[in-house]
Each structure stands twice: as C-alpha cells, then as structure tokens.
Image (cartoon, helix red, strand yellow):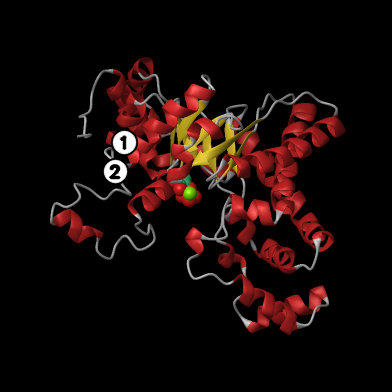
Amino acid sequence: PPQMTGDFGTLMGWVDRFRTLKVRTNADTPHDSKVAREFGAEGIGLCRTEHMFFEAERIAAVREMILAADVEGREKALAKILPMQKGDFIGIFREMKGLPVTIRLLDPPLHEFLPQEDKDIDELSRTMGVPAATLKHKVEFLHEFNPMLGHRGCRLGITFPEIYDMQVRAIMEAACELVKNEGFSIVPEIMIPLIATVKELAVLKANAVRVCDEVIAKYGVQVEYLIGTMIELPRAALTADEIAVEAEFFSYGTNDLTQTTFGLSRDDAGTFLPSYVDAGILPEDPFVSLDQNGVGQLLKMGCERGRSTRPNIKLGICGEHGGDPESVIFCHKIGLDYVSCSPFRVPIARLAAAHAALGGGTDQTK
Ligand code: PEP
Ligand code: MG
C-alpha cells in the first residue's frame, strides 16, 4: 500500500531490524487479513468468530441450536453452519499464506443470540415444530441480568459442547483441505476464551483434541495444531501456572481483564470515567492505555507463572492495548512474544516495539 513505500517504508524497514516483539493483527475477514498483511502484520493474534454467527442465514440456525431439546437437535442445527464456517477459515488461512492464525472459539454473551421478538419465536416454532410457549419459556429461563459476567466464552463451550466441536471441525477441515490440495503449511492455533480455572480448559481441550484428531485421520494428512487460552480474568492470571499445564499459548485479553480487575464495565466506561481522568484519579482511560500498576502486574505474573510450568509457552496480547504504544513497550518489557492489534495500528505497534527494543518508554509502575 502507499503507506508502506517512500520514506515511511524506509523507516519501517529500520524499525523491523531492531524490534524483537512480533506484531500480529486482530482480523476476522479475508479483507481485514489482507489489509493487515500489507501493513506488515506477521500473523493473526485474534480472529473473533462472533460476527460470523450473526449473518442472516446463520442466526436462525444458532437460535435453533440454543433452543433445541437435545444433542441431536443441536447438532442438526449446527450442521447447517459448518460448511459456511469452514469457508470463513479457508478464506482467512489463504490470505495469511502460512503465517500463524489464532482463532478464538465463540465468545458472545448468550443473550445476543436469543430471539427477542415474538415473530422470531413464532418462526422458530414453525421450523422446529415446537410450541411457541415452550420456546418462550426457554428464552426466559436463559435471560441474565449481567450477561458480560454470565453465560459466555468457555462457559458456553461447557454447556453447549456442540458449538465448539463444530468450530474446531471447521478450523481443522479448512486447514487439512488447504494442506492437502494447495500445499499450504499451516498450524492453526485454537484459542479458548474466558477461562477461569484449568478444569474448564482441560475439558474443552480434550474435546478439541478429539475432533482435531478425527479430522486429521479423515484427511490422512499431517497437520499440527496448538490449543491455548485467553487470560482475561484475574483468576486465570493468578493460576497461570496451573493453566499452563493445558495451554500451549496464552493471549492476554486486556479488555476483559481491565473490566474485571477494576470491576468497571467496558461497555459503560463513558459515563463517569472521563471525570475520573479529569480529576486525576486515573492518569488515563485504562481501556485505552494499559494500567501498568494493576492490570499490567497481572500480565507480568501470568507470564512468570505460565513460564514456570511451560518454559516455551507462547505469550501474546490481543486486547485493544496491543496497539497502544506505551502498552506495547510494557509488553516488550515483560517478555511477550507478540502483540496483536487492529490492522491500521500495526505500523504504530511495529514502531513502538522497536522503541522498546532500544530502551524507550517510561516505567509507569510505582
Ligand atoms: C479482550 O477481552 O481483551 C479481548 C480481546 O476479547 P473481546 O474484546 O472480544 O472480549
Ligand atoms: Mg474478551
């Protein structure tokens, strides 16, 4: 792209000679992946999969899956999504041409998928052959007052294991197909969100390994894969030594980790946070620039504890802070392997990583 040529291109060439921290991107479409590669991204650190499920043909199937009476019903609904989901990953893997790709399994607050209007429930009632009143009752049962602290992330993977099974199948079928037919090299990184205890990860990892090995056997190709987790709850950082028994990589989800460490809603941060910053109670918006004294210390602890169990564990960050210069410098200092940020912030993250390698930045911890 034009941004990468001329003097700017020369500067970025120097930057890459000095930095040791890798820079990946957060992308969930082939288009974003392409843009990010052009900006110098060295992989995808976070491919969110939530948006993929909101597409018109899919949302009905998702609702059907949630409201199905049994495993068979859930699997039948998800079978409609599998080919589309596989297509999503083929498109992204192709665009990334063998660079690492971390795909995060579904992490929506469940309520976003529930039918809200009577007409949606009536339609589901017709397609599923179940009385509308029964479906309505189920929707009411699933209602939560605090969905961001509720039935989301890996908790959904535990209660609806068929969702993650379908996604893992789609990821591995996409990878195996490209390896087999297009001579690609690809090592998918499967990431499980919102882990609080190692037991959650152990259960979900066992399921994922079973599906991966089944797909690999079916295609008869040799494909490696990694299974890791997001560290985005304080408990995960505190027990990172236990979690690293199961996780082959960690990625810090500092959006949720900031929310849960401060007990501060990331979705309502505009209401009083600016006055806190104005009054000097907080130096900056902690959702923008990493709170190095608090949240940053959890990152540091997570790295130390994770590495004490698994010395070569791969460590990254994929919250918004991965594209904020001071936060990137902090990530270099605590020894992360990579930061991941939105495509347009990749150049600034590369620059900050070089700045860090040359000893730049201020220590904001006190
Ligand atoms: C995070 O919590 O920092 C994260 C990257 O995940 P999401 O923003 O999708 O919750
Ligand atoms: Mg998160």
Q: Give the residue drawn at x 35%, y 63%.
A: 268
Q: Is 225 placed above or below 273 here?
A: above
Mark earlier in primary sequence (2, 1): 2
Residue 115 located left or right of residue 75: left
The residue indicated by pointer 2 is: 289
Quadrant location of the C terminus? top left
Q: Mark 2 and mark 1: span between their CA atoms?
A: 6 Å
From this view, report whether residue 150 is shown above or below residue 94: below
Give the residue drawn at x 51%, y 33%.
Answer: 250
Among all residues in the image, which is located at the extreme top? Answer: 17
x then y, percent, for residue 315: 48, 29
Residue drawn where x is 18% and y is 60% of the image: 275
Q: Position of residue 73 (x, y in %)?
A: 82, 63
The residue nearer to you, when weighing 91 against 105, is 105
- Assign a secondary structure to mark 1: helix
Whether residue 338 is visible here, answered yes or no, is: no
User: What secondary structure is marked by label 2?
Assistant: loop
Cβ atoms under marks 2 and 1 closer than 8 Å:
yes
- Tell me the kind of residue under disc 2: Ser
Q: Is residue 94 above or below residue 120?
A: above
Q: Which residue is mark 1?
A: 327
Quick check: can you spot residue 214? yes
Residue 152 on image: x %, y %: 56, 57
